Amino acid sequence: MKVVVIGAQWGDEGKGQIVDYLANEAQIIVRYAGGANAGHTIVTGGEEYALHLIPSGIFYPDKIVILGAGMVIDPVALFSELKMLQDRGIDTTGRVFISDRAHIVLPRYIQIDKDRDAARKKPIGTTGRGIGITYSMKSDRDGIRMADLTWREKMDELEKGDREFLAPYIDRLLSMSIDLSLYLVHRKNSQVLFEGAQGALLDLDLGTYPYVSSGMSCAAGAAVGGCVGPRAIDKVLGVFKAYSTRVGNGPLPSEFDPGSEDELCRFVRDTGREYGVTTGRPRRCGYLDLVSLRYACLTNSIDSLVMTHLDVYDTLDEIKACVSYRIGDRIVENFPASIADLNAAKPVLRSFPGWKKSLASALTYEEFPEAAMEYIEFIERFCETPIDIVSVGYDRKATIIRKSPWTR
Ligand code: IMO
Ligand code: MG
C-alpha cells in the first residue's frame, strides 16, 4: 500500500512526528518535495532531533529512506545532517538513497536566493536555502541532477566554481543514487510512505502564490516526486494543527489580530513552540482556518485528516475557528486565489466551549472530553473528511488512532 502524508496548511503541521509514528508499519519512506527549507522535529527515545532533508523514518533501524525526484538537495546540508545522525548513534549506512532525477542545490543559488528576496519590494521571506533558485534552474533546464554527475559533457560545461564545489561530494552522492521508479516497482508489495514537506498552501500551483515555496508540496507531487503514477497512490493523509501558523510573508486570513489578540498569540506560540526549526523565526499564529483546510482537502483528495497540537488549547475557556471570510461587504466561503482578496479577508469566527482539561492522559478517542470531541467533529463535518488521528503531544504515545491509515 502507498500512503501520502501532506501538510494541509502552511507547513509545520507536525508531519515529521506523524511520519515517524506511521513509519513503524512501512518499509520505505520517500520524501517527495522541497529541500533543506523544511524543518521536522522528532522526539524519540527521550531525544529531540531536527531533520531538514532526511525523511523522518530514519529513526527505525530497519527502514529504507529515499530522497525523491521532486526534491532539491544541498550536499553540504545533506552530509552534515547524516553526520549529526551518525554522531548521535543513528546508523544511516546503506539505507539512505536519492533519486537519480533529484536536483542539486549549489552554493551560488543560495546566495542568489537571499539577494533576490532581499531586493523584492515585498519579500517572500524565503528560508534562504536556495530552494526557489534551484527549482527555477530546473524549469529553465539549466539545473544539475544526480544523474548528471556522471555525464561528462554536462560536468565540463559547468562553471569552474560549481565543478570545484561538487568534486568532493560526487562519489558519496553517486553511492546513494537509485532509479526510484524501478526501485519501487521491484518492491510492489512494500508499504511505502510518501512524506511531504511544506504544505498544501505553500504549493507552487495550489498555494497562495507568490507567497509559496517552489516545489510540488501538494499530494499530486507525491506521484511526480516519488516517480510513480497518480493511480499508484492508495491514500492521502492531510496533517493540520488545531490552529494556524505561517512563517514568512503572505496572507494568513485568520491571523490573531495584532493589538487585541497579542496575548492569545503569545500563549499559542509559546505553548505550541511555534518557532521555525530551520530559521528560528517566531511563527505567525491564528485561529484554525477551515476555509483553507476544506480547500486543501478538495485539491489534494485528502482521504483522512490528522489533527496535531490539540493539547495547546487545553486550558482555554473558549476556542474559535474561522468558517468564512468577510471581504468588504461579501461573505466568502471558498478559498480565493486573489492575494488582494486574501489580504483584505477578515475571519468570520465560530466559537466552541473549551474542555479545560489536560488531553495528555487520554489513551483513546473515547476518553476525550466532550467539548474536544465537539470541536473535532465539527471540523469533520465542515471539511467532509474524517479526522482519523489526533496528536496531543510530542511523544509517540500521544498519538491517538481512531482508524489505522494502513487500511483503505
Ligand atoms: P516544513 O516541511 C513552513 C516557507 C518560507 C517562505 C516560503 C518560501 O517544515 O513544513 P523557500 O525557502 O521555500 O523558498 O521559502 O515558504 N516555507 C515553509 N514554511 N514550513 C516549511 O517546511 C517551509 N518551507 C518553506 O518560510 O515563507
Ligand atoms: Mg517545519
Image (cartoon, grey):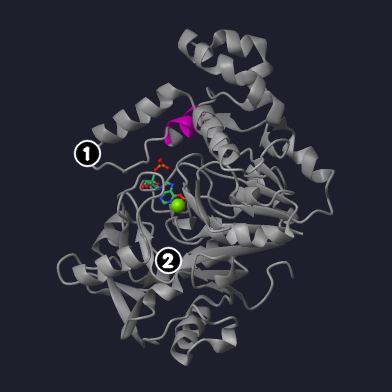
Q: Nearer the viewer, residue 402 or 222?
A: 402
* Residue 27 place in picture, x, y as percent: 75, 52
Q: Quadrant of residue 288?
A: bottom left
| Left-right relation of 238 to 315 | right
Determine which quarter of the picture holds residue 290: bottom left
Residue at horizontal 61 percent and vertical 13 percent from the top: 154
Report the residue marked by disc 2.
292
Residue 403: x %, y % from top left: 67, 76
Q: In which quadrant will I find the C terminus?
A: bottom right
Check residue 135 for magenta coloring: yes
Label 1 – label 2 distance at C-alpha? 26 Å
Q: Main secondary structure of the magenta part?
A: helix
Residue at left 45%, top 55%?
A: 11
Q: Earlier in the sequence, mark 1 or mark 2?
A: 1
Beta carbon at label 1 within 8 Å of ligand 1: no
From the image, tell me which residue sits under label 1: 121
Residue at (54% x, 25% y) in the render? 141
Res 33 quadrant in image: top right
Q: Amino acid at mark 2?
A: Ser
Mark 1 Cα shell of 10 Å, populated few (<14), some (14-19), many (≥20): few
**At label 1, which amino acid type do we have?**
Lys
**Element assignment for label 2:** helix
Magenta part of the protein: which range? 132-137
Where residue 251 appears, as percent x and y from the top left, is: 31, 57
Can the viewer see residue 252 in this picture? no
Q: Does 122 sit left or right of 314 as displayed?
A: left
Location of the N terminus (image quadrant)? bottom right
Q: Residue at x 53, y 38 (%)?
A: 84
Asked if 75 appears above or below 65 in the picture, the reply is: above
